[in-house]
Image (cartoon, grey):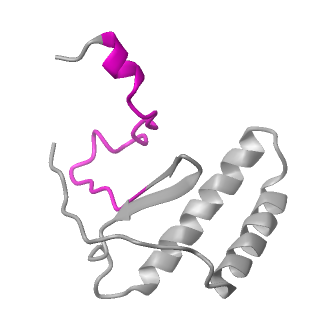
Amino acid sequence: MHDDDDLDDLPEELELPDGVVDANEAVEVLRAWVADGALQVIFDPETFRDDVSEWGRLLSDVAQHVANAVEMDGQMTRAEANSKIQDAFDHNMQTNEVAMSGRIKGRTEH
């Protein structure tokens, strides 16, 4: 049992996407957090074991969803958001300045 003070210390999570709960089969493949200003990610590297280029498609699809949401939120047009995302992606893929550490972790079933 948690007391109310413990609940206030829990990280803020996003809701599950529409369609996940009612899906016949669903698996989480990527989770990203900003914790104390640092990016923390967890994913299953075996998700696209037979075709690692599928990660590129997944990241591209995520970028398209972000650009669409930014437009829906009134921040800028989808085209402007796509351009900014593409520029940042290209720049960051060319630099090897990202500090990384980690290990392979398992899945948690609910």
| Residue at the spot 19% in from the left edge and 58% down from the top edge | 107
Q: Quadrant of residue 67?
A: bottom right
Give the overall secondary structure of the magenta segment: loop
x and y percentages locating residue 106 in the rendered image:
18, 63
Q: Which residues are magenta?
A: 4-31
Indicate the quadrant containing the C terminus: top left, top right, bottom left or bottom right.
top left
Left or right of 19, for residue 72: right
x and y percentages locating residue 74 in the rendered image:
81, 39
Q: Is residue 60 magenta?
A: no
110 is higher (above) or lower (below) than 43? above
| Residue at the spot 36% in from the left edge and 87% down from the top edge | 51
Closer to the camera, 66 or 44? 44
x and y percentages locating residue 10 in the rendered image:
38, 30
Closer to the camera, 92 or 25? 92
Closer to the camera, 10 or 88? 10
Q: Quadrant of residue 105?
A: bottom left
74 is higher (above) or lower (below) than 96? above
Indicate the quadrant containing the N terminus: top left, top right, bottom left or bottom right.
top left
Left or right of 110, for residue 69: right
x and y percentages locating residue 82 in the rendered image:
75, 64
Q: Quadrant of residue 11?
A: top left
Q: Is residue 19 magenta?
A: yes
Disc tally is: 0
| Residue at the spot 58% in from the left edge and 70% down from the top edge | 60
Left or right of 39, for residue 84: right
Q: Which residue ends up furthest to the top in the rendered image?
A: 4
27 is higher (above) or lower (below) than 110? below
| Residue at the spot 64% in from the left edge and 61% down from the top edge | 64
